[in-house]
Amino acid sequence: MLKFLKRKILGSDSEKAADNLAKAASVSSVDRRAHVRITYPQNLDLEALPNIQFQGKNVLPINVSLGGMLVDLTKVNGLVVGTEHEFHFTWKENPEGVFQKARLLRISGRHFHFKFIDLATDLIVRCSLVFKPGERGKKTHKLAPFDMPKDRKDVREMWTNGYGDYVAVTSSKSQPLEIQYANRRYIVCVDKSWILKHLDNGTLKGVTKFVYEDILLFLSNLNSPSPSIHKAMEVLAQISKSA
């Protein structure tokens, strides 16, 4: 949906090393729990994610899934646990959007936990695809130093999940980040500026804004992201606007 410069060292050795990272990423088991809650990016304007309104005002969920969401509604008064309410989900290309009923399950300080009722079909169709990068990011775990790929001395940090996805922070100044998501490999390349490229059969290719958004939602849901990941997200978010 979620999209940097040419890599000169793309020979068979680098391809083999990247394949080994992918194999390491597939070791952990897949969490099959339904309705994985994804972290809703607070500082990213991703077009694929819906705009959500409650009582005519925009709200930004803390986390959300097809089962419900956690929202900060401290400026709304009179809400009672057990009562039903309605949220309005809209998209840039679909301003009419979808009205979705939800029941308030509990209140914890500033946080209001809602469960969706009779989930709208259009919401299921749209959000099942839109939330997927976040769900896969949420299922990652950061590798301990002794679990790092032995043949990749340049890898400083790595996150993997049971789908074969991975994020690797490297010591390379020109290619500081490698990402494999949904069986596609991406390289963050740096020269005078940053750019995200799709590595396809040894060739680096440009990506669309939607790919940038997918990668950003994936990265924003990594478990225990490091300062290196946060920095990459900030730069990629700026670049994605002109992709």
Image (cartoon, rainbow, N blue to C red):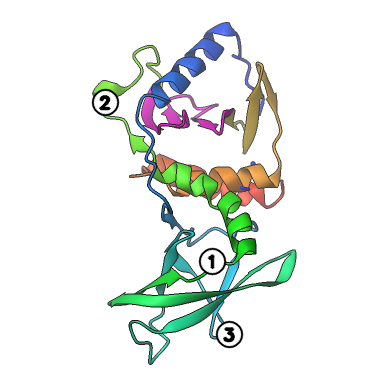
Residue 186 at x, y percent in the picture: 58, 30
Residue 89's x, y, as percent?
A: 60, 70
Q: In this view, does 243 lie to the left or right of 216?
A: right
User: Does the rendering let one see residue 207?
Assistant: yes
Q: Which of marks 2 and 3 is nearer the N terminus?
A: 3
* Residue at (36, 18) in percent of width and height: 149
- Estimate the spatial distance between the alpha carbons at disc 2 and disc 1, rounded to whole Å: 43 Å
Query: Residue 119: which numbered mark, if any?
Result: 1
**Type of the residue with mark 3:** Gly
Stretch of the chain drawn in magenta: 155-184
Q: What element carries label 1?
A: loop
Mark 2 vs mark 3: in front? 3
Residue 169 x, y percent position in the rendering: 43, 31
Labelled disc at residue 145: 2
Element type where label 2 sits in the image: helix
Residue at the top extreme? 12
Q: Name the N-terminal-most of marks 1 and 3.
A: 3
Q: Residue at x 60, y 69 (%)?
A: 51
Residue 56 marker: 3
Discs 2, 3 touching: Cβ within 8 Å: no
Mark 1 surroundings within 10 Å by alpha-carbon count, few (fewer than 14), some (14 through 19), many (20 or more): some
